[in-house]
Image: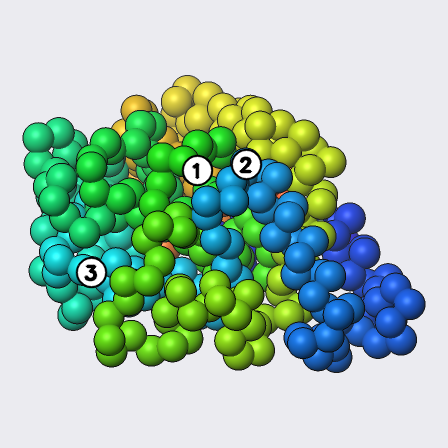
Amino acid sequence: MERVYNFSPGPSMLPLPVLEKVKEALPVYGDTGMNVMEMSHRSPMYQAIIDDTEARLRALMHIPDTYSVLFLHGGATMQFASVPLNLGVKGEADYIDSGNFAHGAAGEAAKYLKVNVVASSRDDNYVYIPDWDGKLNDDADYLHITTNNTIYGTHYTKLPESKAPLVADMSSNILGEVYDINKFGVVYAGAQKNIGPAGLCVLIVRKDLLGHAAANCPKVLNWTTQTENGSMLNTPNTFAIYVAGLCMEWLQAQGGVEGIEKVNKEKAALLYDFLDNSRLFNATAQREFRSIMNVTFVTGDKEKDAAFVKFAASKGLVNLKGHRSVGGMRASIYNAMPIEGVRLLVNAMKEFEVQG
C-alpha cells in the first residue's frame, strides 16, 4: 500500500527520509552490532546519540549554554505538574487560557499553587488568543502560555512581556516557527508533532531557575536532578530520542527552523486562501490568530463535514476529522507534511464543493 498524506494532529507523520534511515538501521545501528532499542542508555554508543540530538536541537533553536536541555518521559502533560513543582517558590503563577491544553495546564497547576487565569477565550470557544494587557502579575513565580492551540487552530502572534519568567508549552509549533529562546524561562514540548515519535518530552530550562523544586517534588519530575543526571536519572525513551535526532538532522537540511517556517507559512496560506474564498468551507479561527500548524474549518453542516472527511480519505488524505470537542475538520500541516499534500487537499475541497 502507498503512503497516505497524514493530517493527524499527533502522533503525526514523520519525514520519509527519516523513516528510511530508521528502517535501514533497524537490525544493526552502525558498527554497534545491535539496534538502538537494545543499547544500554549508560553505554558510550548511546551517549553519542543523545549528545548528538541535544547538539542539533541547540543549533536549530540557538540555545545558549545558560539553558539546560532535557529529554523526559510523559509528553507535555507530565510537565503540567512539573512546572509548578519546580518553579512555585512564592506559590502563585499567572496562566493565559487559550485552549484545551492551556486550560488543563492551569487546572493541574492549581493542585500545587495559586493560579491566576489572567486572560481566557474559553467562553468564545477559543477562536482567538485572549488579551492580557494590564492583567499580568510581575511578582508571580512564572507566566504560562501555550504558543499554539492544536484543537482550535490559533497561535500567539506576539509574546506577553512580564518580569515573571515566561513558561511555554510549545508542543504543536516547536521547530516549526522561529522563536528567540532567550525570551523564555522554560519551554517544553511533546515530541509527537514536529520533533519525533510520541512518548518523549523535550524541556529547555534557564539554569538560574533550577534548584528551587518543592520538597515533595518527585525526583523524576525534578529538573535539577534530571540535569545533574543528563536526562538519565532513569532509562529515557532511547529510541524516540534517536529518531528525534534524525528528524532534527533532516530539518537542518531544510534550512533549519528559519527555512521550514517559510514553507509552513506557504502551506498555511494555500489553505487559508482557499477557505476565505470558498462557498462551502469556512475557517473557524479568527484571522489575526490563525495557526500555521493546525488549520480548522467547517462546512456548517455536520453531515457534510463527515462526508468530506470520508471523501478526502478515499483520496489518501487522512485524519482530517476535527477534535471531538469542536467537530468539523482540522488539517495539521507540521514540518513533515509536504506542500504537495496541501495542494491535494485544496483540490479535494474544490472537487467536493462542486459536487455538493
Q: Answer few, some or many: residues within 10 Å of disc 3's Cα (few below 14, many 20 plus, some between 14 and 19).
A: many
State how many labels appear: 3
Disc 1 residue type (three-letter): Ile
Going by the image, does 126 lie left or right of 236?
A: left
Residue 341 at what x, y percent from top left?
Answer: 64, 38
SS class of the residue under badge 1? Answer: helix
Disc 3 residue type (three-letter): Gly
Question: Which residue position holds label 1?
Answer: 181
Going by the image, does 79 lie left or right of 5?
A: left
Instruction: Using the image, determine if residue 54 lies above or below residue 227.
Output: above
Q: Image quadrant for the C terminus? A: top left
Residue found at x 12% / y 60%: 91
Going by the image, does 337 lie left or right of 68?
A: right
**Residue closer to the observer: 181 or 324:** 181
Q: Which mark is residue 88?
A: 3
SS class of the residue under badge 3? Answer: loop
